[in-house]
Amino acid sequence: MRRLIDITLYLARQNGAFRGQNESNTSLNKGNFLELVQLLSNYDSIKMHLDHINKIHSKQKQPITQNDIISAFATYVRGESLKEMDESKTFSILLDETTDVSHVEQVSFVVRFVHQMEIKERFLQVCDVSGTTAK
């Protein structure tokens, strides 16, 4: 489990996509998360464990579990960022609206602040919005 958490932290820190378009066992590219799990399995006893997991279709490789891990990390990172922002004397909020490929309007929230004499910028979240008028 620790390796899966480390992979999740690594991808989050690098702003990497977790999933691939095709995560089936026959796919040549299953996405960053599963490919990193497979890569790390080549170097130690985790390979035997992964072989066992593949046979029983472990929940740890399922999107719902990945989402749970990502959500927990996001909550923690967001909380730490807000603590740093609370300690700063100045901050700004940046909002940017865009429409995704399915024509859903979304707003991204970013904060910028000075913490211990260093300018920091932190992405907080993306939210769907029902409209972009001032009403």
Image (cartoon, rainbow, N blue to C red):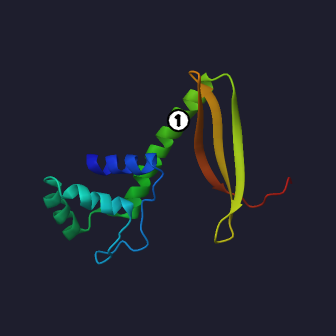
User: Can residue 116 be seen?
Assistant: yes
62 vs 119, left or right, is left
x, y percent for residue 88? 63, 23
x, y percent for residue 93? 70, 39
Neighbour tally class for label 1: few under 14, some 14-19, many 20 plus, Cα within 10 Å: few
Q: Is residue 113 above or below residue 47?
A: above
Q: Is residue 89 above or below residue 63?
A: above
Q: Which residue is mark 1?
A: 79
Residue furthest to the bottom in view is 26
SS at badge 1:
helix
At a point 39% along the width and 74% down the height, the residue shown is 22
Q: Nearer the viewer, residue 56 or 102?
A: 102
At a point 47% along the width and 39% down the height, the residue shown is 76
Q: Nearer the viewer, residue 70 or 117?
A: 117
Q: Is residue 60 above or below residue 57?
A: above
Position of the C terminus by quadrant: bottom right
Q: Is residue 49 above or below residue 93?
A: below
User: Image quarter for residue 120?
Assistant: top right
User: Image quarter for residue 31?
Assistant: bottom left
10 vs 74, left or right, is left
Residue furthest to the right in view is 135
x, y percent for residue 95? 71, 47
Q: Nearer the viewer, residue 64 or 87?
A: 87
User: Can residue 1 be seen?
Assistant: no
At a point 60% along the width and 22% down the height, the residue shown is 87
Q: Name which residue type carries label 1.
A: Gly
132 vs 24, left or right, is right
58 vs 31, left or right, is left
x, y percent for residue 99? 69, 64
